[in-house]
Amino acid sequence: MATADRGVSSVISVILMVATVVILPATVSVFALDFGERINQPAPFAADTTGEFEPETDEFRTNQIVQITHRGGDSVAVEEVEIIVRASGPGLDTEARLVDLPATDRYITDNIQGNVGLIDSDSAIVPMEIITDDGPNVWSAGDTIQFRISTGEADFRDPPKSGNPDADTLEVIIIHTPSDAIISENTFTP
């Protein structure tokens, strides 16, 4: 009785061919084209944030302060945060961004893009909580981001001081820059 010396070589050769033609180039392209590093990090989960905005009520520039408080969720490194501030009203539409945080000086002018005058850059008047480089530089539950809106660029008083632009809506958006995700968004209409 003659036995055949044939095995399953045709099946194995098909599997090897598929692996060579499909899987190997796909694996090499991931490393060669650097797709692995382009995947965004997941955004931190800020479970709850609250915001307060107090229009200016005195002449000593101690009000018109924005406070965004982190109530729960993941802590966020301040250097991974960018803050967009938009003020609008009759004949007013202006925007500023707080970038490259925390600021290394109490004058944060170098950290403002857009309408530099919209955000009061002198933290001697109103402490720039979390924004300036004098704390742990992590926005955690219970911490507040604080800054002041200049009345010369957006006056939320009723009525506004003569010559100041009348503002009625303030929007504050906090973005996690590595993931390009919004982690807090507040709109104020004082």
Image (cartoon, rainbow, N blue to C red):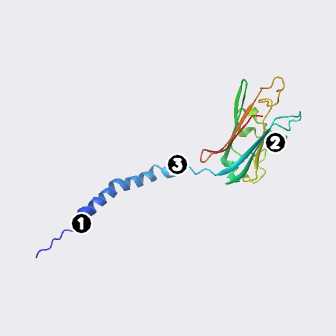
- Hey, which quadrant is residue 12 in on the image? bottom left
Q: Position of residue 124 (x, y in %)?
A: 84, 42
Q: Residue at x 75, y 38 (%)?
A: 109
The crowding category of the residue bearing disc 3, from other C-alpha atoms within 10 Å (few below 14, some 14 to 19, many at least 20), is few
Regarding residue 132, the answer to whether it shows in the image is no
Are the residues at dot 2 and dot 1 in contact (C-beta closer than 8 Å)? no
Position of the C terminus by quadrant: top right
The crowding category of the residue bearing disc 2, from other C-alpha atoms within 10 Å (few below 14, some 14 to 19, many at least 20), is some
Residue annotated with mark 2: 123
Q: Is residue 139 above or below residue 4?
A: above
Q: Helix, strand, or loop for circle 3?
A: helix
* Between discs 1 and 3, the one toward the N terminus: 1
Q: Residue at x 45, y 49 (%)?
A: 33
Q: Residue at x 71, y 47 (%)?
A: 49
Residue type marked 3:
Arg
Residue annotated with mark 1: 8
Q: Which tag is nearer the camera, tag 2 or tag 1?
A: 1
CA distance separating discs 2 and 3: 37 Å
Residue type marked 1:
Val
Regarding residue 122, the answer to whether it shows in the image is yes
> Position of 82 compared to 9: left or right?
right
Residue annotated with mark 3: 38
Q: Position of residue 83 (x, y in %)?
A: 69, 41
Res 36 label: none
Q: Is residue 73 above or below residue 158?
A: below
Of 185 and 151, the residue lying toward us: 185
The crowding category of the residue bearing disc 1, from other C-alpha atoms within 10 Å (few below 14, some 14 to 19, many at least 20), is few
